[in-house]
Image (spheres, helix red, strand yellow):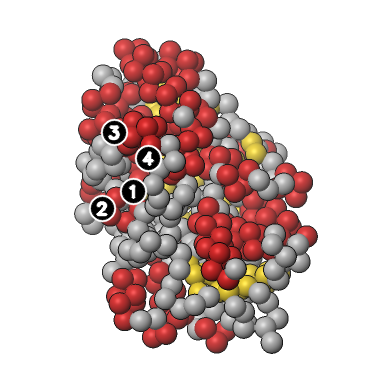
Amino acid sequence: MSTYDAVIVGSGPNGLAAAITLAKTGRKVLVLEAKDTLGGGMRTMELTEPGYWHDVCSSVHPLGVASPFFHDLPLHEYGLEWVYPTAGLAHPMLDDTAVILEKSIPATAARLGPDEEAYRRLMEYLVHNQSAILNEFLAPIHFPRHPFVMASFGLKALQSGSGFARRTFQTEAARGMFAGLAAHAMMPLEKIATASFGLMLGMLLHGVGWALARGGSRSIGMAMARYLATMGGEIVTGMEVRSLADIPPAPLQLFDTSPRTLLQVVGDAFPAGYRHQLERYRYGMGVVKVDYALSEPIPWRARECALAGTVHLGSTLAKISASERAAFSGHQVDEPYTLVVQPTLFDSTRAPEGKHIGWAYCHVPNGSPNDYSPLIDAQIERYAPGFKDIIIGRRVHTAQQMEAYNANYVGGDINSGVQDLRQLFTRPTLQINPYRTPIKGVYICSSATPPGGGVHGMCGYHAAMTALRDIL
């Protein structure tokens, strides 16, 4: 007889979300994790020097705050505390000025000069309709429950990031700021629908804030694990699943893994057609990430950058577009679009007293073995002269090393697959319910399913709800 009602492979946010969803119905759940610690993309480790706690992957979690799944969990009772920087984002220019995005829309818009009114109208509309937009965006493909809101949003979201920036804003600063937001798509900004990423991130910044978890992203995973334990859920770490024989018998098996790993584990048990679809699944750009132990805060030339948890470096729309286009096509520019996060300005628990941490990454060709950290260092130095002098220690993860750390990041792709229109709602395969596989009781619940990347748990929740409906 089966000991468990469900086994989940992988303890990332979606694996834990699936486990919690199933455990809440009284089912006995086991989570298997290949690494020695749980969390997937929610791990925090001493990567550089003792006492300096770095998030190995994600650090900033607007979707964690906004997610309907997380909203319904009492994670604050299990150690999760959100920390909100004074400003969510800074976008410095090379003339020592910076665009600062804080939660207040009027305060942010007031700094944009000729673009004040356009920005205020855009963001007020988005935030006013945030609940409807999020509910549609975070669900699998379906007929919209808010068709008029989504039609209006879609007219903007389906545009290219570069085209939307040029049509909406007049100044280089505002256009560059939006390009930095849209570049989270990890696609060329000339591609259709890349504007949607800039719109969503801007909406979340003003609607809920770009929060960090106090103590690091591991606090999210640990809180989820503690909550799961109260319902009898079990987690076993250091248990790599290489085949179905490694999984204890259970009527439900859910995989918080990449399609590639799912293929490796299940293999020929899948019909040829389904295998072929998984083999054709497309992965996007990788990242090279550098974690820094710092003797003091980053010395930004634009002092306003010290107010922000996240800083986008790339200056203009033209430069950011060129960087993303090059990386997507297998090349790299000398001044890559670079994302910087500086957690200890707002959470002193992450470093020894008076010291700081920071991390930065740039987008690179998928699977690249190259160390782009000299380019990242130089890019930060352009906006913060003297930065190199305050580095105490560093740790570099190339795109290949990111995959070695987390098999879901194929080729260093932290979004677990290209998120264009062709693959956003049909990931990982083209079918009405993307969480089901052809094998009864086997499901995929990773960010390779809708709604895609981000620490929100919705992929795991939707997969678990599919499984529950199938067995009722």
Disc 3 to disc 1, C-alpha distance: 21 Å
In the image, 324: left or right of 211?
A: left
Residue 67 makes an appearance in the image: yes
Disc 2 to disc 4, C-alpha distance: 17 Å
For disc 3, the marked residue is: 155
Mark 2 neighbour density, 10 Å: few (under 14) some (14–19) many (20 or more): some
Residue 342 makes an appearance in the image: no
For disc 4, the marked residue is: 197
Q: Nearer the viewer, residue 176 or 276?
A: 276
Look at the numbered disc 3 and give the secondary structure of its residue. Answer: helix
Q: What amino acid is found at the position of numbered circle 2 in the picture?
A: Phe
Q: Earlier in the sequence, mark 3 or mark 1?
A: 3
* 330 in relation to 346, above or below: below
Disc 1 to disc 4, C-alpha distance: 10 Å
For disc 2, the marked residue is: 328
- Which mark identifies residue 449? none
Disc 3 to disc 4, C-alpha distance: 14 Å
Mark 1 neighbour density, 10 Å: few (under 14) some (14–19) many (20 or more): many
Q: Earlier in the sequence, mark 1 or mark 4?
A: 1
